[in-house]
Image (spheres, rainbow, N blue to C red):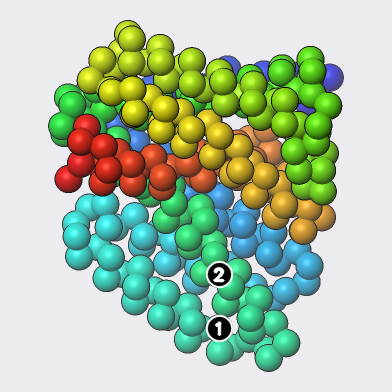
Amino acid sequence: MKQGYARIGTALVGLPLVLGVLWAGSWVFFALMLTVALLGQREMLNLVRRPGIDLPGWPALVVGGSVFLHLIHPSGWIAPIVGVCWLLAWSLRASVEDAVERIVGQLASVIYPVLMLSFLVDIRWTAEEQLSSPGGFTLTLMLFLLIWATDTGAYYTGKAMGKTPFAPTISPNKTWEGTVGGCTLAILVAIAFKMWWLPMLVWTDVVVLALVGGCWGQLGDLLESSLKRSAGVKDSGSFLPGHGGALDRFDSLIFSTPLYWIYLLHISPLLAV
């Protein structure tokens, strides 16, 4: 019961906060995404560390924070590249037995979730620049709602008619029926955005963005579940009462963002640069 109240309380506080920051955009959104990314990175390092691997986290966190510099200036990539080289050199301090785990764990934490989530800021800023502030907010909000719709549709469809396991060794409660239900609701949400809020979307955009934000996002949830199973923990952290950690709450968003970014900025003519 207490867990349920904590979950509701966190949602009542967190949802308006995320929506408000998403609407504000600019450096406010940058700061929130950087915070979420670094919290998720710390959780990722803890998941790797749990089996007993000696893995100091601060070097990777420093490099992770530098990744967001590429959003500010093209030369911002220099800092994370130098940082990665530094991480590799730092790993020479490790014992021979855990050298591979230390290198892979630290580098993986820089990519997932930090680098992957940084592209969401680029989407928000580029969309605002090319579509106006409301357009940038709406196009970024669409990704959040596609993910939330997929989770909701998958949960209720799976609960009502789910029989065929989707990934029984990773998440026994997920079913193919729930997956189809989640993707269907995501497509309906994408259609609603085209009809009422983003009329500039073509039908190809609707289908692709729904698949990226919906179906592909479910794989992000499975990825995070596999990491937790490997580490033998229920939640990645306790940052969000009733919801677990940053990775627990934003796993689908992290996984979907890079493809959403690739499609909008490099394939679709909507924001192609």
Does residue 110 appear to the left or right of 263 in the view shown? right
- Mark 2 or mark 1, earlier in chain: 1
Residue 81 pos. (x, y %): 34, 73
Residue at position x 41%, y 15% in the image: 191
Does residue 49 appear to the left or right of 252 in the view shown? right
Position of residue 139 relative to residue 49, above or below, is above
Say which quadrant the N terminus sits in: top right
Does residue 74 appear to the left or right of 110 in the view shown? left
Q: Quadrant of residue 159?
A: top right
Q: Residues within 10 Å of mark 1 (few under 14, many from 20)?
A: many
Residue at position x 46%, y 17% in the image: 189
Tag 2–tag 1 contact (CB < 8 Å) = yes
Mark carried by residue 213? none
Q: Residues within 10 Å of mark 2 (few under 14, many from 20)?
A: many
Please name the amino acid that badge 2 sits on.
Answer: Gln
Q: Is disc 2 placed on a helix, strand or loop?
A: helix
- Nearest the eye: 238 or 162: 162
Is any part of residue 104 visible from this angle? yes
Residue 207 pos. (x, y %): 42, 27
Residue 206 pos. (x, y %): 38, 24
Please name the amino acid that badge 1 sits on.
Answer: Ser
Q: Is disc 1 placed on a helix, strand or loop?
A: helix
Q: Which residue is mark 1?
A: 91
**Disc count in the image?**
2
Position of residue 182 relative to residue 44, above or below, is above
Residue at position x 26%, y 37% in the image: 268
Q: Quadrant of residue 102?
A: bottom right
Does residue 195 appear to the left or right of 43 in the view shown? left
Label 2 – label 1 distance at C-alpha: 9 Å
Q: Which residue is mark 2?
A: 106
